Amino acid sequence: MRRFPRASRECKKDQQGIAATGVGGLFLPLSLRVTALTISNETESPDGWVIDTSVSSKVDAIAPLCRSVRGKILVRENDTLSFELPNFYCNWMAVGNVIVKADLSIDNIDLKARTFSGFYKITFHGTGNAAGSGYYRAAIISQG
């Protein structure tokens, strides 16, 4: 079971969405922002769902090329969900090659507003290194 920092269930005013900060190359400051998660396939499993996901993000306004990732949405005993995206590869022109890992806890789903929220933790390591955590709120948008 993943543990998340439990500061408060409020999004930080200076941080919009899921983000990480760190350094790349020779101490270049980096700021990553996840802009979307797209689920292309889901399969029910005994403890939740196995999902194929692609991540859209920007690092200092440069969109990386990231491979899709097979993740999991797990149902936990405390009536929350865990959304796990294990190590997946991304390449940024300015930063180079990195391995990204993201864990999201989903503790609230508002079907009427089509939103969900919870705590997150994201890291990437390689020629750039960054980490971030906090509370997020995301909108559910149907494609098609």
Image (tube, helix red, strand yellow):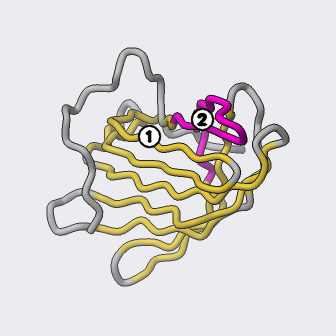
Q: Residue 132 has which mark?
A: 1
Q: Residue furthest top?
A: 13
| Most foreground residue, 28 or 59 | 28
Q: Residue at x 50, y 40 (%)?
A: 140
| Most foreground residue, 51 or 122 | 122
Magenta part mainly helix, strand or loop? strand
Q: Are marks 2 and 1 in contact (CB under 8 Å)?
A: yes
Q: Residue at x 39, y 52 (%)?
A: 104
56 to the left or right of 50? right
Please state the horizontal and vertical placement of residue 99, each as a whole percent of the image.
Answer: 63, 59
Residue 141 in the image: above or below residue 100: above
Q: Residue 32 has which mark?
A: 2
Choose top left, top right, bottom left or bottom right for residue 93.
Answer: top right
Residue 68 in the image: above or below residue 106: below
The amino acid pointed to by label 2 is Leu
| Most foreground residue, 58 or 44 | 58
Q: Residue furthest front?
A: 26
Please state the horizontal and vertical placement of residue 19, each as a whole percent of the image.
Answer: 50, 35
Please state the horizontal and vertical placement of residue 97, each as a whole percent of the image.
Answer: 75, 55
Q: Residue at x 42, y 16 (%)?
A: 14
Q: Which quarter shows the N terminus?
A: bottom left
Choose top left, top right, bottom left or bottom right for residue 88.
Answer: bottom right
The amino acid pointed to by label 1 is Gly
Q: Residue furthest right?
A: 93
Q: Which residues are magenta?
A: 21-38
Q: Residues within 10 Å of mark 1 (few under 14, many from 20)?
A: some
* Mark earlier in primary sequence (2, 1): 2
